[in-house]
Image: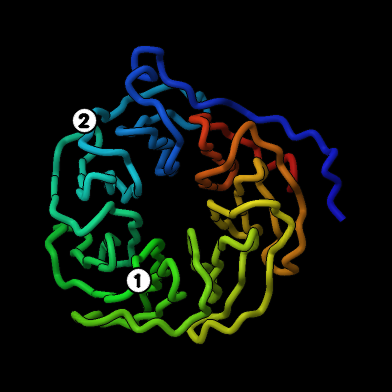
Amino acid sequence: MVSSRHKYVPEARLVPPERVMLGLTGPVSNIARAGQLVFVARGNGVQVFKVGSWHYDSSMWRLSGTVSALLVDEDRVLAGLSSEALHAWSLPGWKWLLASGGYPGPVRALALDDRHLYVASGATVEIRDRRTLDIKTVLYDYCDRVCALAADNENLYAAGEENGISVVPRPLTKGVLPYQGPRNASYVIEVDEGRLFSASRDNVVLVYTLPGLHHVGTLSGHDSDVRALTTDAEFVYSGSYDRTVRVFNKDSLECNAVIRQEGPVTSLSVDGRWLYVGMANGIAVVWSKSQWT
C-alpha cells in the first residue's frame, strides 16, 4: 500500500529567461533527455536546459505550428508540428536539416529503431531512413488515425484512436496497418523488454507481452486519463490529468509512489538519476529518483 501523504520535493523547475518564456507559452507537449541536455517543447518551440545545473541553454521557436511530437536522436532534434510538418535540426547550433510539409494532419508521434524514423500523421505512418531522413515507404490505415508509435528492432507498433494496436514486422513495406491488438484507445505506448505498456482513456496502463499482445496486467490508481508514460530499468512511470505521477515496479506491477504535481501531466522522460515531468499549465519540473528508490 502506497501512502499518498508522502511529501516528495522537486529538484528544479525548467524555466527559461523571461524574454524566451514570453515567446513560448502553452502546455508542455513533450520533454526529452539526450546527453547532458533536456529538451522541453512548449507552444511553437523547443527550449534546452543543462542537466545538473538546470540552466537555460538555447531554444528554437516561432515554428509554423505547435510542437506535437518531439524526438532527440544523438546530435539531432526532430519535431512534429500541428501545422502538418516535420522539422529537423543538428546540434549544436540548431542547423536546419529538414523542413517537410504536406502531411495529412498534425504529426502526432515519432519513433526510432536502429535504421528507421517513423512519423505518424492522420491515418498514415511514414518511414524514413534514420540518418539521411529520406522517405522509404508509407503505411496506411483507411479507417483510423494513428495517435502513438513505438518500435524495436523486430517490429513497429502503432496505436489507433479506436482500432487498437498494430504490430508490423520488419522488413516494412507499403501497405495497410493490420490491427490485431486490443480495441482500446491509447494516448501513448512504450515498448520495454518484451512487453508493451499502453496508456489508455480508461485511467489505466495496460500491460501486454510481445509479440502476441497478450494482456498480463493492469496498472491502476489514476482518477483521469493517463497521458504520459515512460520506463527505466526498475519502474514504469505514468502521468495523468489527475495531477499525479505514479511509479510502478516493473516486475510486481505494484505502485511504489504517488507524486503530486502542480498541473495535469502531459509528458514524462527519465534517465538514471532524474524524472522529468511536463504539464498542461506550462510547468516543467525535475524530480530526483532517490526519493522513491
* Percent x, y of residue 222: 70, 53
Tell me if residue 241 comes above or below residue 55 in the rendering. below
Residue placed farthest to the front in the image?
143
Answer with left or right where residue 222 lies relative to residue 206.
right
Answer with left or right where residue 190 lies relative to residue 208.
left
* Percent x, y of residue 226: 59, 54
Crowd band around label 1 with a 10 angstrom C-alpha radius: few (<14), some (14–19), many (20+): some
Crowd band around label 2 with a 10 angstrom C-alpha radius: few (<14), some (14–19), many (20+): few
Residue drawn where x is 36% and y is 24% of the image: 57
Q: Nearer the viewer, residue 45 or 252?
A: 45
Label pair 1/2, CB-CB below 8 angstroms: no
Q: Nearer the viewer, residue 52 or 149?
A: 149
Cα–Cα gap, marks 1 and 2? 38 Å
Q: Which residue is mark 1?
A: 144
Residue drawn where x is 54% and y is 47% of the image: 270
Quarter holding residue 60: top left
Specify the amino acid type for callout 2: Gly
* Percent x, y of residue 218: 68, 70
Q: Earlier in the sequence, mark 1 or mark 2?
A: 2
Quarter holding residue 90: top left
The residue tagged with tag 2: helix, strand or loop?
loop
Q: Nearer the viewer, mark 1 or mark 2?
A: 1
Where the N terminus falls, by quadrant? bottom right
**Labelled disc at residue 93:** 2
Quarter holding residue 41: top left
Q: Nearer the viewer, residue 288 or 21?
A: 21
Tell me if residue 141 comes above or below residue 246 in the rendering. below
Q: Nearer the viewer, residue 144 or 49?
A: 144
Residue placed farthest to the top in the image?
18
Tell me if residue 274 comes above or below residue 71 in the rendering. above
* Percent x, y of residue 168: 35, 80
Specify the amino acid type for callout 1: Asp
